[in-house]
Image: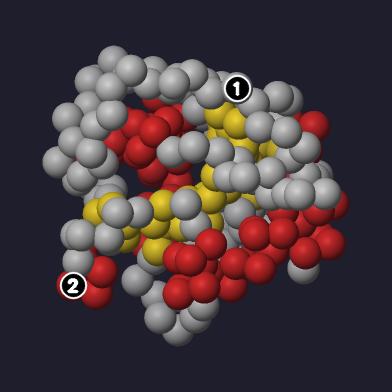
Amino acid sequence: MIKIFKRLLGKQEQSPPVKELEATVPLTDDIAVSKAYVPVTETTIVYLPAIDFHSERFGRRPQRLLKALAEVGYHVIYLNSSDEYYQVDDFEYPYENLPHFVVARAGQSVRHLFGHNRIVYWVNDSRLSDSVEAAYPHLVIYDSLTDPDHYEKQKHAMEAVADTVFITPERIYEHGKHCAHVHLITAEEFEIQERAEQIAKIIDHLPNRPAPLM
């Protein structure tokens, strides 16, 4: 599995420069975010295979959040699992007004799409914890779905690897609201843009992961 990740995603050899923010704001779920928020650095979010892009499972939570993040200004590469539907083309661009949102067929190399951007891995499947840690992205987000029989089998390992953890309301009593790197993120249609801007500010405040000593 780790070798497959290296082939598809490659390694990040150095961290891109990230602008320092002038004010330090506590990251709480009630954080006020400007509706005109713009990411502070060029960033690509890579969704690691878990939920088929065309699937209706989990209320299309990852698809909705990532589309909203693309509307904020992030580049999004959705590595499709294709476990429900077969993707014909190597790359799909599902949103005409978002050419920087691409859905890559399972097995396609996407390293050439990274450029010199900051790379953020978005993970739903906790079983990828070892592979994610060995791939050396700049940042790891674990969006924990309420699915103890499948995607959460190694959730504690993934939570330890991730730089930040997003949870659904169903898991609020398990985590509480006092763990610094855990944030309650909902994905209802009426608030999706607000949640995307909240996530954007969380991402921009987090420093890059340390580069490997090699």
Nearer the camera: disc 2 or disc 1: 1
Name the residue: 37% across, 21% down: 21
Name the residue: 19% across, 46% down: 29
Q: Tag 1's secondary structure?
A: loop
Residue named by callout 1 = 17
Name the residue: 39% across, 66% down: 145
Query: Horizontal and vertical percent for residue 87?
Result: 69, 51
Is residue 56 in sight in this rendering? no
Name the residue: 26% across, 41% down: 27
Is residue 149 in sight in this rendering? yes
Q: Tag 2's secondary structure?
A: helix
Identified by mark 1, the residue type is Pro
Quarter of the image holding residue 109? top right
Instruction: In this rendered view, identify the residue nearer to me: 113 or 96.
Output: 113
Task: Classify 10 Å Cα crowding around label 1: few (below 14), some (14-19), many (20 and above).
Answer: few
For residue 173, the mark is 2
Q: Does residue 135 sit above or below 197 in this rendering?
A: below
Identified by mark 2, the residue type is Tyr
Query: Horizontal and vertical percent for residue 208?
Result: 55, 38
Asked whether the residues under the numbered discs 2 and 1 touch, taking CB atoms below 8 Å apart as contact, a structural biologist would say no
